[in-house]
Image (cartoon, coloured by chain):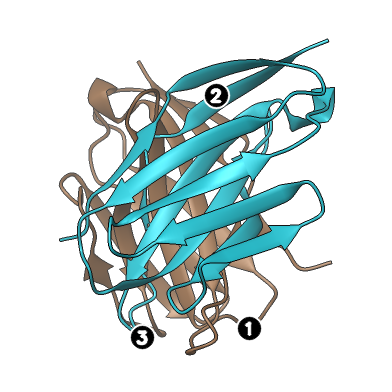
Amino acid sequence: DVKVTQSSRYLVKRTGEKVFLECVQDMDHENMFWYRQDPGLGLRLIYFSYDVKMKEKGDIPEGYSVSREKKERFSLILESASTNQTSMYLCASSRTGAAHYGYTFGSGTRLTVV
Amino acid sequence: GENVEQHPSTLSVQEGDSAVIKCTYSDSASNYFPWYKQELGKGPQLIIDIRSNVGEKKDQRIAVTLNKTAKHFSLHITETQPEDSAVYFCAARVNFGNEKLTFGTGTRLTIIP
């Protein structure tokens, strides 16, 4: 069964800490995405990547950065965590192509910043 | 950029009845429209999708319709069951080669036994 694995299910971090959220996929997908999910706001795109070492800003990149050193791994970094970054973070991957494959999502990381 | 609106935000349906969730999109260049189901404690999962060259697609109790002229698409669930209770998201994507999806704000569907 294909999988997107997020390293932590729940995280509690202090304001100002540097936070790493890790995502690994085993499907050899080219594309990887980070979304945050908040009630009433749906899924909002933070960053995405079409290839190794490549990244593009999504709709809400402020306060975040990403790293993709290997095809299977896409990391989200909160340089200095703030309370307004308390949220559910979802990683997804997809295949490139005109066949329009859907996303495969991980189970999410619920981050609380105190 | 693309904007996707989804209604209603919550929906309660008696078991066995039908449920309909509607989405509108803003960019006429959008050509791919998936629907995702998110169960409690899990990530969203693709349940059905439709391309812009098709008006309707059905998979057992689930169907999606697309009206390109009006720029809206809908999810229809018939003979609802308790396991249909979840949050549903619609999404839209513009252009071949651009893999980025824009999501609606979600609908929490509750099936009443």
Where in the figure is residue A54, as x and y percent of width and height? 31, 81
Measured in 3D between alpha carbons, the distance from the residue under mark 1 to the one under mark 2, in whole angstroms, is 32 Å
Write down which chain is painted cyan. B
Where in the figure is residue A70, as x and y percent of width and height? 50, 81
- Residue plotted at (21% across, 59% down): B2
Measured in 3D between alpha carbons, the distance from the residue under mark 3 to the one under mark 1, in whole angstroms, is 20 Å
Mark 1 belongs to chain: A
Position above or below: B25 against B30: above
Q: Which residue is mark 1?
A: A28
Quadrant for the N terminus of chain A, please. bottom right
Which disc number belongs to residue B96?
Answer: 3
- Residues at discs 1 and 2 in contact (Cβ within 8 Å): no
Q: Is residue B82 visible?
A: yes
Q: Secondary structure at mark 1?
A: loop
Residue B76 falls left or right of residue A34: right
- Residue plotted at (63% across, 35% down): A9
Mark 2 belongs to chain: B
Q: Secondary structure at mark 3?
A: loop
Which disc number belongs to residue B108?
Answer: 2
Write down which chain is painted brown. A
**Residue type at tag 2:** Arg
